[in-house]
Amino acid sequence: MSNVVIEVIDYQITSKAVWNAEFTLKLTAYGFVQSVHDHCLFVKPSSSGIMALIVYVDDILITGPSIDDIARVKCYLHDLFTIKDLGDARYFLGLEIARSSSGLYIAQTKYTLDIVRDTGLLHAKPASSPFPPGLKLAAASGTLFSNPGSYRRLVGRLLYLGFSRPDISYSVQQLSQYLNQPCDSHWKAALHVVRYLKGCPAKGLYFPAASSFNLRAFCDADWASCLDSRRSLTGYCVFLGDALVSWKTKKQSTVSRSTAESEYRSLASTVCELRWISYILSDFNVPYSLPVELFCDNKAALHIVANPVFHERTKHIELDCHLVRDAYKDGFISPSFVPGVLQLADVFTKSLPLRSFLSLISKLGLVSFDPSPTCGGAIGVSHHLHHQSKFQQQQQLQHLDENEADVEELLDTG
């Protein structure tokens, strides 16, 4: 599978909407089909397999099994527009890409280090987790921050970094709630996230080539966790084989009356995401097994899925009930119970104790990258550091058991 990046540097069209329509017209004339589920994605079947093209304004990523097919597409586009061939995909939209025959690694190391440098924390003590365990932010929590523009810029950069860092998903979602009137406590919490990133700037996602195409998902909710609105928090993560392909932390749109209700709304959000991912896989003609395993740690919510009777406590969430129940009845999902200690989505709904946090992120496919050739290349390093990180985590956990006082010092936000 080959991947190349090209950039259109002169297309003589001022409107981005007009440019997109013109570019789409030219691609479809060549035989590409625009996905109805993601308009930035174009696919074209060929004798050697599926060729895909992803467009973001004037940045284009082309991937396919045949180098010759890709070369012909580039020649076709060059005849229509002035393009710049950036070669093999190593950097795209701020994402650093390293690959080999064993898999793919995506990170934002330079972007992370830029954030650490710009906040003046290059020499600060690293934090072991994005937030101190149990930390919950609130709107009225101290003095208003004197420079709200700096807070907004930092949170915006952390949001973009979150494209490759699921480990900061919860903390960044919490920080993003206070962009209008941030307090000193919010700024302090944001700097804690940066200190965490300082300790692991090269951490990114690893996608093993030998992985299967079986979908599975974990979903969780933290009931009434917002101290200001008492709305609950949804968290989920979706795996394609062993690769994490989607995750989210999001405040629910309405107040839930019970834990089961909040967990059920989380199930509904996850089903919607699974549907979308299944559509994208269909665009690529990728077969996947049904039903999709969907793990939840709330038995009451799972009972609502399987029970066709609306009870007094659940009749007001009828829409979500129909959505999840239809997916269950159609054989699209197989809801299953998972104990709380094995709930991977837990890391997306709350600030966990250090032991739990390290355990869960080690299962998300997050690894660090070292470009040194002695480790066998990018993907070889990923495997090496994946096992090394587990060993380091065991050492760290052992140290925490031996000296609990060090934990408080390690998690000190001052």
Image (spheres, rainbow, N blue to C red):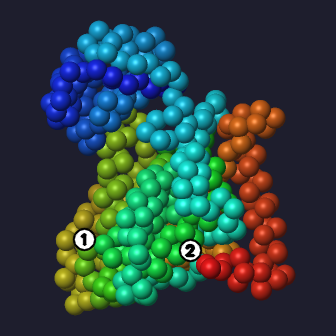
Location of residue 80 with respect to 132 vertically, above or below: above
Looking at this view, is 122 or 175 the one in front? 122
Q: CA distance from mark 1 to mark 2?
A: 32 Å
Residue pictured at 50% horizontal, 21% vertical = 87
Residue pictured at 22% horizontal, 90% vertical = 312
Position of 221 with respect to 121 (left or right) is: left
Q: Total number of numbered labels? A: 2
Looking at this view, is 249 or 327 the one in front? 249
- Residue 243 percent location from the top left of the image: 54, 48
Q: Which mark is residue 190?
A: none
- Residue 349 percent location from the top left of the image: 46, 73
For label 2, the residue is 131
Residue pictured at 46% horizontal, 76% vertical = 186
- Identify the amino acid type marked 2: Phe
Identify the mark nearer the N-term, 1 or 2: 2
Looking at this view, is 307 or 345 the one in front? 345
- Residue 236 percent location from the top left of the image: 44, 64
Between tags 1 and 2, which lies in front?
2
Is label 1 in a helix, a strand or a loop? Answer: helix
Mark 2 Cα shell of 10 Å, populated few (<14), some (14-19), many (≥20): many
